[in-house]
């Protein structure tokens, strides 16, 4: 039928599960099959989601890849699995990590608790510890609540007082101008380098 692609591949018994009485491929096998046949970014979104939800693990994904060693696209699937991170909490964060990689940025730490002498400030989406820079992926509803927006501003001020540079970016910015997001983060690296790290706060997570 038009618009339908048919792929044929072997299916070991260990790659099959039964859900509501219906045989289906396991989550790990499904992730690897999608990673083999989809663009890298899409594969990362799927793999991150499976890892974050606990429905697959890296060893399980690695075992499927080993069983599919000579199949088309397995090299890309292996790259996806190596890059995937269970700490990514949304497709937005997964796509941002791919954009950071494509833009030549070093890998950030994810979901890190950051504090100062007064205690914890909060958990940040992305932290480049060496560069003293925090980046936050701002969802559409983040500032819909005025009080929530005020809390975010206060937190940003406290992060900056602790010596961190803070960069915010939206989904629209990441999708339409990822190079500008990368440039903003690089500019934050440069500012942090000029300020030095003597008075920088601490990352506790």
Image (cartoon, rainbow, N blue to C red):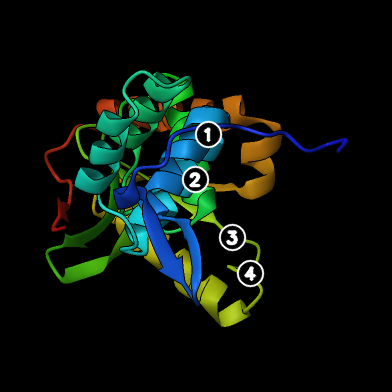
Q: Which residue is mark 3?
A: 139
Locate the N terminus and report the quarter of the image it occupies: top right
Write down the residue under mark 1.
41
Q: Measuring 55% from the left and 30% from the top, which residue is drawn there? A: 37
Residue at which label 4 appears: 141
Image quarter of the C terminus:
bottom left
Q: Verify CB contact (< 8 Å) between mark 1 and mark 2.
A: yes
User: Whole-Å distance between the Cαs marked 1 and 2?
Assistant: 6 Å
Tell which tag, 3 or 2, sits nearer the viewer. Answer: 2
Query: Are dots 4 and 2 in contact, CB under 8 Å?
Result: no
Q: Residue at x 34, y 43 (%)?
A: 12
Q: Residues within 10 Å of mark 2 (few under 14, many from 20)?
A: many
Is residue 205 in sight in this rendering? yes
Q: Mark 3 or mark 2: name the one nearer the start of the chain.
A: 2
Residue 39: x %, y % from top left: 57, 29
Q: Are marks 4 and 3 in contact (CB under 8 Å)?
A: yes
Q: Are marks 1 and 3 in contact (CB under 8 Å)?
A: no
Badge 3, how many Cα within 10 Å: few under 14, some, many 20+? few
């Amino acid at each position: 039928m038009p618009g339908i692609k048919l792929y044929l591949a072997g299916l070991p018994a260990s790659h099959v599960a039964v859900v509501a009485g219906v045989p289906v491929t396991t989550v790990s096998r499904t992730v690897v099959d999608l990673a083999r046949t989809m663009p890298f970014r899409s594969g990362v979104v799927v793999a991150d989601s499976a890892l974050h939800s606990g429905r697959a693990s890296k060893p399980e994904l690695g075992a499927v890849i080993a069983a599919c060693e000579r199949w088309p696209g397995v090299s890309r699937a292996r790259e996806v699995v190596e890059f995937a991170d269970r700490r990514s909490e949304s497709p937005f964060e997964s796509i941002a990590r791919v954009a950071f990689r494509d833009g030549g940025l070093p890998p950030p730490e994810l979901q890190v608790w950051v504090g100062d002498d007064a205690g914890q400030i909060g958990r940040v989406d992305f932290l480049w510890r060496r560069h003293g820079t925090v980046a936050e992926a701002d969802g559409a509803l983040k500032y819909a609540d005025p009080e929530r927006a005020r809390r975010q501003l206060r937190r940003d001020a406290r992060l900056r007082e602790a010596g961190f540079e803070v960069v915010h970016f939206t989904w629209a910015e990441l999708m339409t101008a990822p190079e500008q997001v990368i440039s903003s983060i690089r500019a934050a690296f440069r500012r942090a380098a000029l300020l030095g790290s003597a008075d920088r706060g601490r990352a506790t997570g």
